[in-house]
Amino acid sequence: MPALVLLGAQWGDEGKGKATDLLGGSVDYVVRYQGGNNAGHTVVVGDQKYALHLLPSGILSPTCVPVIGNGVVVDPSVLLSELSGLNERGVDTSKLMISGNAHIITPYHVTVDKVTERFLGKRKIGTTGRGIGPTYADKINRVGIRVQDLYDESILTQKVEAALDVKNQMLTKLYNRRAIAIEQVVEELLGYAEKLAPYVADTVLVLNQALEEDKVVLFEGGQGTLLDIDHGTYPFVTSSNPTAGGACTGSGVGPTKITRVIGILKAYTTRVGAGPFPTELFDEDGAALRRIGGERGVTTGRDRRCGWFDAVIARYATRVNGLTDFFLTKLDVLTGWEQIPVCVAYEIDGKRVEELPYSQTDFHHAKPIYENLPGWSEDITKAKSFADLPKNAQDYVKALEEMSGAPISAIGVGPGRDETIEINSFL
């Protein structure tokens, strides 16, 4: 049975939650494999809207087991708050599983994240200030705290001491902040142990056994391809690997078990935070996309930067992820434009470039080369099939498919769960 990876093919916020939720009733497990509560998904079910930050979108499907994999960094207070909020709304969260190898975001990670960004000033990266980067840094430096450490006070204390030995020197001598008390951190973390215990599991074993039993497993990435620490617009990236390869390392499931890789594309482009964005709009069109698309970050609360569709980025995402399909979202937002520009290439130093530049410098200087496609004015939110779309909308989808290098198998024509056109089944 299939193991599917579903990920963002732009800078995140493409509508992955809607896509995951659409598949949720057909899959047995939905796995978050990287990131933390710096990622957000909005899922609309009927007249109910759910904003998920750390939990897999599959938690809203009663038949699905949601899993937080070893590649995720977990803020226990955020996780427990999110679980409590869903329980109050009648959502059953008892099936959730959390990898004992997932790393914990501690209070000192959040503190370091915030003071470092302030210290950088104009050179800041634009992090969410939630401690994600410092937690991944500690993981790589082998001084991280894992979920399983909450159940051994001696090991936990030793690890907190080791981490704070350096961090307190930095906080007091470089940033002029007070030192963080080791005992206080240990006490707070131990306070989460009992509440998290029912969810902690050997998720690597569980997921591999599920695939051996012909269960369907969906791997859900946070953020997007261009925010990948290795393959994104470095240094304006996240601290983990949202690309398809991250699904394997972040879950413990080998690459030979992955059968399809689905990229989520917005019908235009958005970005949150600092960094290059060739098609960004600073005019009325950009404001209109932001207003009509409701472009505000689910987790950050920040307005998203908006621009026209960038086919260069889409082709790049197809290549580095090995995409087999695209899910195109928010096509309805483009209704009403007489002409819709699409970026088909860049101009860099007077030369036409059709692939994403290898050089950071070149990408910063890239200017979009546009082709205008005819727009449409008809309401498409009630469309149930591709044939129901106006001809110009059909042509727009076909053009994006040809430029992007993988078939568009589903189209979002509205925010609702049922406002999706399925062209080819993902299963």
Image (spheres, rainbow, N blue to C red):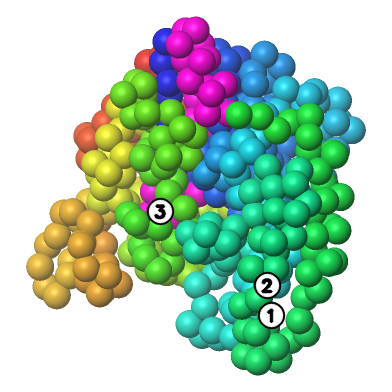
Tell me if 306 is positioned left or right of 156 in this view: left
- Location of the N terminus by quadrant is top left
Which region is colored magenta?
203-228
The residue that label 2 is drawn on is 164
Tell me, yes or no, whether the two marked residues, 2 and 1, touch with CB atoms within 8 Å. Answer: yes
Front residue of this view, candidates 31 and 342: 31
Which secondary structure lies at badge 1?
A: helix
- Location of the C terminus by quadrant is top left
Please say whether residue 215 is one of the residues in the magenta stretch. yes
Tell me if 275 is positioned left or right of 361 in this view: right
Q: Residue at x 49, y 30 (%)?
A: 219
Front residue of this view, candidates 233 and 107: 107
Gap in Å between the C-alphas at discs 3 and 1? Answer: 30 Å
Which secondary structure lies at badge 2?
A: helix
- Circle nearer the viewer, 3 or 2: 2
> Neighbour class for label 3 at 10 Å: few (<14), some, many (≥20)?
many
The residue that label 3 is drawn on is 228
The residue that label 1 is drawn on is 168
Which secondary structure lies at badge 3?
A: loop
Identified by mark 1, the residue type is Asn
Number of on-image labels: 3
Front residue of this view, candidates 381 and 49: 49
Identified by mark 3, the residue type is Asp
